Image (cartoon, helix red, strand yellow):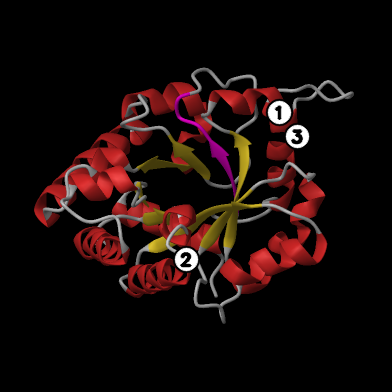
């Protein structure tokens, strides 16, 4: 398979860089007039895919909101991933997996092995058992043409106590993760497949080298307070590789498919204007 970074660059250039989250939490299902059950979950997920799959570059389903329903919820997640990918939209599975050895290999196999019913174009992972613990996922992603998004500088306030902690060499943990990713992506063209999660709400990040030759998944646009206009100031020269994620800002307009499309298109236009200015 063509590497994820190449496929993502093509999708961003042709469809715009917007990533829409698929986050069927109970309050959102209720706002759509849906019950917090399997039927509501399936209706919600199917509507989002049908409304947006032909226009957005990336979907990011949050696995936890499906897993909370047990095996039936996972079955809905499988269909959501399959339907989205069949329609030409890339899928980043937001599962934030992280472990060591054979357990990490099993997590990777669940989401990065093309034979798996949950196979996704990329997976979010946590490196805080040490970046080397991600090796099974890195290796499988390379073999399968998939990608990873590694938590580096997240938007939640609690993240700073780990990510901005300073190592003995004077470099922060977050900067160390970015450096590892730059090494993974060295020589990739047009863009590497190993990205970082970097919050769009973090303000000035000029002290960090975000030029990792890979994508930067940026949550925080919309309901969390960041705007498309903030992106150049936050990401600087790396802004062209930013994949801004919007969830509630788009999803709150459902279940009307036209309203979902209009909301996604408005965000996409604002983001495109900001990152190409």
Q: Tell which tag, 3 or 1, sits nearer the viewer.
A: 1
Res 142 seen here: no
Which badge, 2 or 3, is on the more N-terminal residue?
2
Q: Residue at x 38, y 55 (%)?
A: 58
Q: Nearer the viewer, residue 100 or 172?
A: 100
Residue 108 shows in this picture: yes
Q: Specify whether residue 3 is painted magenta.
A: no
The percent position of residue 27, horizontal first and vertical second, equals 28, 43
Report how far apart the C-alphas of labels 1 and 2 lie in the structure. Answer: 31 Å
Q: Position of residue 50 (x, y in %)?
A: 22, 65
The residue under label 3 is 176
Q: Which residue is mark 2?
A: 70
Give the residues drawn in magenta, as a range. Answer: 193-201
- Mark 2 is surrounded, within 10 Å at the Cα level, by few (under 14), some (14 to 19) or many (20 or more) other residues, namely few
User: Of helix, strand and loop, which one carries label 1?
Assistant: helix
Q: Vertical placement of 161 versus 103: above or below?
A: above
Res 162 label:
1
Q: Is residue 248 left or right of residue 123?
A: left
Direction from residue 79 to residue 126 in the image, left or right: right
In-front residue for pair 73/58? 73
């Amino acid at each position: 398979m063509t590497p994820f970074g190449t496929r993502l660059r093509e999708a961003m250039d042709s469809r715009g860089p917007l990533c829409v989250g698929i986050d069927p939490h109970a309050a959102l299902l209720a706002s759509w007039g849906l019950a917090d059950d399997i039927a509501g979950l399936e209706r919600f997920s199917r509507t989002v895919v049908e409304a947006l799959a032909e226009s957005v570059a990336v979907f990011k389903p949050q696995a936890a909101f499906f897993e909370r329903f047990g095996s039936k919820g996972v079955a809905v997640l499988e269909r959501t991933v399959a339907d989205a990918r069949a329609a030409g939209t890339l899928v980043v599975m937001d599962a934030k997996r992280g472990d060591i050895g054979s357990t990490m290999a099993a997590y990777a196999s669940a989401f990065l092995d093309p034979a798996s019913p949950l196979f996704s174009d990329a997976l979010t992972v946590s490196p805080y058992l040490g970046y080397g613990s991600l090796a099974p996922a890195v290796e499988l992603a390379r073999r399968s043409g998939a990608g990873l998004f590694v938590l580096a500088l997240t938007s939640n306030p609690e993240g700073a106590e780990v990510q901005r902690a300073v190592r003995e060499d004077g470099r922060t943990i977050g900067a160390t993760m970015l450096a590892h990713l730059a090494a993974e992506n060295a020589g990739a063209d047009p863009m590497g497949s190993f990205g970082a999660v970097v919050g769009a709400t973090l303000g000035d990040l000029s002290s960090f080298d975000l030029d990792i030759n890979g994508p930067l998944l940026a949550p925080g646009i919309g309901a969390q307070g960041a705007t498309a206009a903030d992106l150049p100031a936050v990401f600087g020269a790396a802004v062209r590789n930013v994949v801004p994620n919007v969830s509630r800002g788009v999803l709150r307009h459902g279940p009307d498919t036209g309203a979902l499309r209009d909301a996604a298109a408005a965000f996409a236009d604002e983001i495109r204007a900001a990152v190409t200015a």
